[in-house]
Amino acid sequence: MNRRELKNRINDSFLELAPDVYDGIIEAPIPESVLEDELGFGQRMRDSFWKKSGLKMVPIYACLLLVCLCWFGLEWRDKDNVYVTLDINPSVGIELDGSYDIKSVEGLNEDGKRLVKRLQWEKNQTLEDVMERITELLCQDHVFTSRNMILVSIGQSDNEKYKSLKQSIEDGLDASMRRNGVADVVLAFQQTQSGEKNHGRDVLIKRLMNECGLSQDVCERMSVEEMVVYFNQRGTTQLETTKISVETSVTEDTDETTQERKGEICPKDTRDDSDKGMVSEDDADETTTEMTTRENTGLTKEESDKKNSGNNGKKGKSTKVNENSTKEKKKKTPNENSTKEKTTKAPNENSTKEKTTGTPNENSTKEKATGNAKGAEKTTKSNDEK
Amino acid sequence: MQVGFSKKKVYIDEGLFERILQGEQDAFRELYEVSYRPLYAFLLSLTQNSEDAKDLLQDTYIQIRGSCHLYKKQGNPMAWMMKIGKNLFLMKCRREQSRQYIRYEDVEYELGFEDLSNVDNRLLLEKMFSILTEEERTIIVMRDVTGLKHREIAKLLEKPVGTILAKYNRGIKKLQKEFGER
């Protein structure tokens, strides 16, 4: 059947069906003057169509509104929350509610995750409780034998609240460190944006990249201590550092037994002499120079070693603290930096540090500082030799 | 009853509306005789129910009687009348909020095809209502039964001309394929 035939057939088929309703039309009363709109020629039809569609959309709008309200509600709630990260390696993130009670704790790196698994934290515990538990675990793991700086990043834009929380954390960590027999830990505080879960280490890396011009690759290979020291020396701003759990009662720790005991937490002190060795300002300058040299030439190790040997025997007192006790009780492993000049406030503290911030790879070989037995971080080499 | 129909496009004199407005019943009768079959075909393709189409047909002409003063010369009064019929159908749908879908087995009964004497015609209509979509069927009726142009159909249905052309051709091909295989 071709098209024309088909069309004709369709036409005939339909037309045959049509009933005659003329009589019914004539009998019906003629309607009063009809308006155009009544015939549906105006917008009326479209309006009613949209109204109909609108009614159907009401449940959808209601759901969307509910979702938005929930989201905004969560937003408001989240803004009261504070996110605190502790970076030592391990790195741990702690979310606090408006009352500074624990909402969540999470590990931010592999070591951190392993730590959190053992933490057995509970919601609504106090921050102090959790920090106490974290410190216990860190001591069990002998973390502070090789590191003694904690980067504490507090996600609170309000300065008053930031200071208040900072003080709480400082006091809490101080108390827990003392209870666990850890001494001379340095806290470096960093303020980050509130309402966001910022990992302190990542924030510091960005700041190092922006303010100090380091590459991300180099930053990621640096330890927390190296980053803090480098940043405080080279950045436009400085991180506030505080030494906690300072042992003022013990003046000299020359006793090996004592050192060994402390070594349970902080390993054997490799220093032969009293523990008062600290890097003097001259040493700090040299260290800075070494760092600069390192960055520039890459011959750091040898140069730094030479310099360090020249520095042997130098001691300095910390302007901040009168102690000494074991300064760095930590034994430096080859991979660690001996640099302990952490606190920028007291550059005289610490021993040798060659912090090769510029070339973290070289750290393993550095064991420079040995000369300063006292405060120096004893390089493992020296330790080994001993 | 076999009725032979002109295969030419339906032609309606626009002057009839002025005469109807003046009260001439013959003019209205003339208008009715020329247009009621294609108008019924169009309404049947919309309602898919012979009784509903019959009611709408009557309502449409009643409205036309009362609204001849609204007609504006536009070349083809058929499109204007079909628009009235379509709007009445939509208003009825909204009122009833229901539109029964005709099952194939009920097609003959609901649509009144059993009254058709010509078996081939009956078969054709049954196929049109079963294998074509509503749009394809309506467009074919408007094009081949009422004689509207594609442009006029597009305006009436508020769709692009290209869409109307495509759907029309698609519908015809479906029917050709169906009847070409027999």
Image: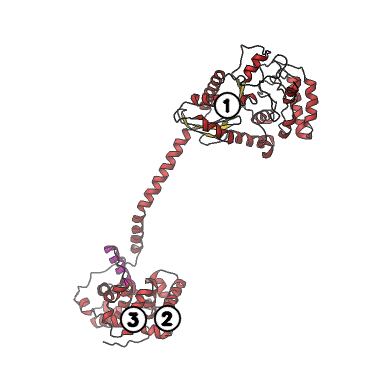
**Badge 2 or badge 3: first in the primary sequence:** 3
Where is the C terminus of chain A found, in terms of image quarters? top right
Give the secondary structure at mark 1: helix
Left or right, residue A314 beside residue A248: right
Q: Amino acid at mark 2?
A: Gln
Tell me the distance, in whole angstroms, between the alpha carbons under discs 1 and 3: 88 Å
In magenta, the rendered stretch is B83-103
Chain at numbered mark 2: B
> How far, Cα to Cα, is label 2 from label 1?
84 Å
Mark 1 residue type: Leu
Q: Residues within 10 Å of mark 1 (few under 14, many from 20)?
A: some
Report which residue position mark 2 lands on.
Answer: B176
In the visual, does A214 lie left or right of A187?
right
On residue B150, the disc is none
| Figure check: B152 above or below B182 | above
Question: Main structural element of the magenta stretch: helix, strand or loop?
Answer: helix
- Which residue is painted at 68% across and 39% down in the image? A217
Q: Tell me the residue that label 1 is attached to.
A: A138
Going 79% across and 34% down the picture, which residue do you hit?
A297
Verify whether residue B4 appears in magenta.
no
* Snapshot quadrant of residue A184: top right
